[in-house]
Image (cartoon, helix red, strand yellow):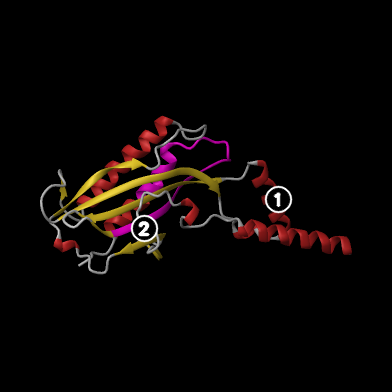
């Protein structure tokens, strides 16, 4: 009887540890890249499509004050380095897709300018700060004592399904004043891969970009 109670207690402990290790829906401070000048004002909020986002908006910001936006091409920050799971071709395809989709989304909100020169221009700067994969959050049916232990074993052995993730940081700058009027840090989820050795391809990550783009289009008009 004591043995059984001990087994259950250990299983419950394993469940608690697994839940504590579940992936966060937003980037944490250790995952900030340094691309933005100030992260202290960011607040957790919810996007138009219900995704958790870290965001700050200057309370005086009004889109109607600007004649257009200049979209500076997406960069990797810090500079992208291919890995065994994410090769250079994948990194190039992800960046190209992000440029295409974000530019199209911005054009649905306001005029996208070909040059940042002239008055009343917003400068949009976007960086992809990480492309990775992490263990999926535990499903409700994995939280019973026995299945929690099985899930723990799978995670340790590398056979647990993983979510592909893309981290993006962006800012809008008033070109006239040089003042930042909006900052965003977004962690996006793409499709899943079978384990922690499976390669991450552009096709899996595109879903994360698509979700972000939808939120750009649906973001409430500011002024």
Q: How many marks?
A: 2
- Is disc 1 placed on a helix, strand or loop? helix
Mark 2 or 1: in front is: 2
**Crowding near pointer 2: few (<14 within 10 Å), some, many (20+)?**
few
Residue at left offset 64%, top offset 46%: 155
Give the left or right position of residue 101, taking residue 156 as reference. Answer: left
**Crowding near pointer 1: few (<14 within 10 Å), some, many (20+)?**
few
Magenta-colored stretch includes residue 192: yes
Residue 219 drawn at (x, y percent): 29, 61
Indicate the quadrant where residue 2 lies: bottom right
Indicate the quadrant where residue 222 lies: bottom left
Magenta-colored stretch includes residue 148: no
Residue reaching furthest to the left: 118
Q: Which residues are magenta?
A: 182-210
The first of marks 2 and 1 along the sequence is 2
Please give the residue where the numbered disc 2 appears in the rendered image. Answer: 38
Residue 191 drawn at (x, y percent): 47, 45
């Amino acid at each position: 009887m004591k043995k059984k109670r001990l087994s259950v207690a250990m299983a419950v402990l394993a469940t608690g540890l697994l839940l504590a290790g579940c992936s966060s829906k937003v980037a944490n401070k250790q995952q900030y890249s340094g691309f933005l000048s100030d992260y202290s004002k960011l607040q957790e909020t919810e996007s138009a499509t219900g995704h958790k986002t870290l965001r700050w908006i200057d309370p005086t910001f009004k889109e109607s004050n600007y004649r257009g936006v200049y979209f500076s091409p997406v960069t990797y920050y810090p500079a992208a380095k291919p890995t065994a799971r994410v090769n250079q071709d994948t990194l190039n395809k992800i960046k190209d897709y992000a440029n295409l989709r974000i530019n199209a989304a911005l054009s649905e909100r306001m005029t996208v300018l070909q040059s940042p020169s002239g008055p009343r221009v917003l400068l949009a700067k976007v960086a992809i700060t990480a492309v990775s994969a992490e263990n999926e959050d535990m499903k409700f049916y994995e939280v019973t004592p026995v299945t929690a232990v099985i899930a723990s074993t799978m995670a340790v052995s590398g056979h647990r399904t993983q979510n592909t993730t893309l981290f993006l940081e962006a800012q809008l700058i008033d070109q006239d004043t040089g003042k930042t009027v909006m900052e965003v840090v977004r962690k996006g989820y793409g499709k899943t891969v079978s384990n922690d050795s499976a390669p991450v391809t552009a096709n899996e990550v595109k879903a994360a970009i698509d979700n972000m783009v939808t939120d750009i289009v649906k973001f409430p008009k500011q002024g």
